[in-house]
Each structure stands twice: as C-alpha cells, then as structure tokens.
Image: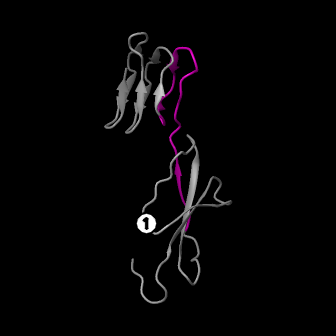
Amino acid sequence: MGYTGGPALGGFKIEKSTDGTNWSVLAQTISTTYSDTGLAPNTIYYYRVSAFNTVGTSSPSNPASSTTLAGCSPPASSDWTITSNCTLVSNVTAPANVIVQSNVILTIPNGITLTVHFGQYHLLVQPSGKVMVNPGGKLSS
C-alpha cells in the first residue's frame, strides 16, 4: 500500500462496536498495529479503521470482527468443578480444590497464571480430563 500526493497522513482512527452499528472511537494513532485489552469474555467485537490528515477523514474500512474466548472463573469460596472446556482469560487463584471432570479441557494461555495453594488444596483431573498449559502460561502454588 502506498500514498502519493496531497497532505501527509496524520494517522488512523480505530473504532469499536459490540453490535456493528453503534461505533465509538477506540484510538487515534500513527501506528499500524494496535492491541485492544480488557475485553469481556465470550463477546463479539467489531472494528473499523479510517485514515486522516489535515484535509479530513477517509470513509471507514469494512468492519472486521473477532470473538473473545468464553473464559471461566472459580466460585468465591468452594471447590471449583470444571464441567465444560474452559480457557482462563485472567489470572486466577483457586479458593479451594480444582476438579477437571472427564472429557473436559482446562487451558491456561500465554500470560495467564492459575494459582492453587497445593499445601491446602489439590488439582484433580478425572480420567480423560486435561490441563493444557500453553507456552507462557503458568500453574503455580
């Protein structure tokens, strides 16, 4: 992609929507990359980008969409029985035992830590259940 003629590029306006109709400005930047953080689990987000300079702002791009992972979190004070596939979306300290039922996968992705106080509690994985710790994810005590 190139740009020739006219005023220099001032930057990009990034907009976000949860319904693809109502848009809010997420950022104005000169960078060609941007990370949106603090997103809600199991939510579809729509994004579009416009270029701007001293003359004005271009029409927005066609929207692109992405859905965040469903996520999961433990109860406040009892054993955490995981009954369906679960991907942690933030750091978690288990309040008691963690029980991964049969045929269920608990995933700890990059940058996320699951803390289980192993002196008091256990991580119990039933037959055919799995705990997947992705590179950069952590299981700690």
Which residues fall within the magenta stretch? 62-90
Q: Position of residue 114 (x, y in %)?
A: 42, 27
Q: Count the labels in the image.
A: 1
- Quadrant assignment for the C terminus: top left
Which residue is under mark 1? 31
The residue at 43%/9% (across/down) is 120
Relative to 101, residue 91 above or below: below
Q: Position of residue 102 (x, y in %)?
A: 44, 19
Q: Position of residue 85 (x, y in %)?
A: 47, 29
Asked whether 79 falls inside the magenta stretch, the response is yes
What element does badge 1 sit on? loop
Q: Position of residue 72 (x, y in %)?
A: 53, 30
Relative to 86, residue 59 above or below: below
The residue at 58%/45% (across/down) is 43
Give the residue type at disc 1. Answer: Ser
- The secondary structure that dominates the magenta segment is loop
